[in-house]
Amino acid sequence: DRPFKCDQCPQSFNRNHDLKRHKRIHLAVKPYPCQYCEKQFSRKDALKRH
């Protein structure tokens, strides 16, 4: 059982760190902007893939 549950959707996680990262989706926090275009991302790995 995953003890860290999101209070806004059915997702749950094994680690609190993963839950905190997930919650950015609901908050629309996107601290990782692309330096070449207007797009912004909530996760650094998503920016790197872009």
Image (spheres, grey):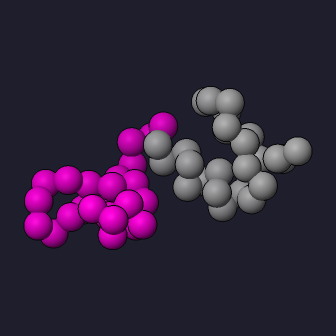
Task: Judge from the rendering whether residue 18 lies leftward or rightward of residue 36; answer left or right.
Answer: right
Residue 37 belongs to magenta span: yes
**Residue visible at 48% across and 37% down in the picture:** 26
**Residue visible at 11% across and 59% down in the picture:** 37
In this view, 6 is above or below 22: above
In this view, 17 is above or below 30: below
* Image coordinates for residue 28, horizontal then vertical, percent: 39, 42
* Image coordinates for residue 45, horizontal then vertical, percent: 42, 66
Q: Is residue 34 visible?
A: yes
* Image coordinates for residue 15, horizontal then vertical, percent: 74, 59
- Which residue of the protein is positioned furthest toward the right in this rendering? 1
- Which residue of the protein is positioned furthest toward the front in this rendering? 49
Task: Judge from the rendering whether residue 35 lies leftward or rightward of residue 26; answer left or right.
Answer: left
Residue 31 in which image quadrant: bottom left
Quadrant of the snapshot with the C terminus: bottom left
**Residue visible at 33% across and 65% down in the picture:** 49
- Which residue of the protein is positioned furthest toward the top in this rendering? 9
Task: Judge from the rendering whether residue 40 lies leftward or rightward of residue 18; answer left or right.
Answer: left
Quadrant of the snapshot with the N terminus: top right
* Image coordinates for residue 10, horizontal then vertical, percent: 68, 30
Please provide the residue range marked out in magenta: 26-50
Q: Is residue 31 visible?
A: no
Residue 3 belongs to magenta span: no
Given residues 36 and 6, the one toward you in this image is 36
In this view, 39 is above or below 7: below
Task: Judge from the rendering whether residue 10 lies leftward or rightward of residue 48; answer left or right.
Answer: right
Numbered label tally: 0
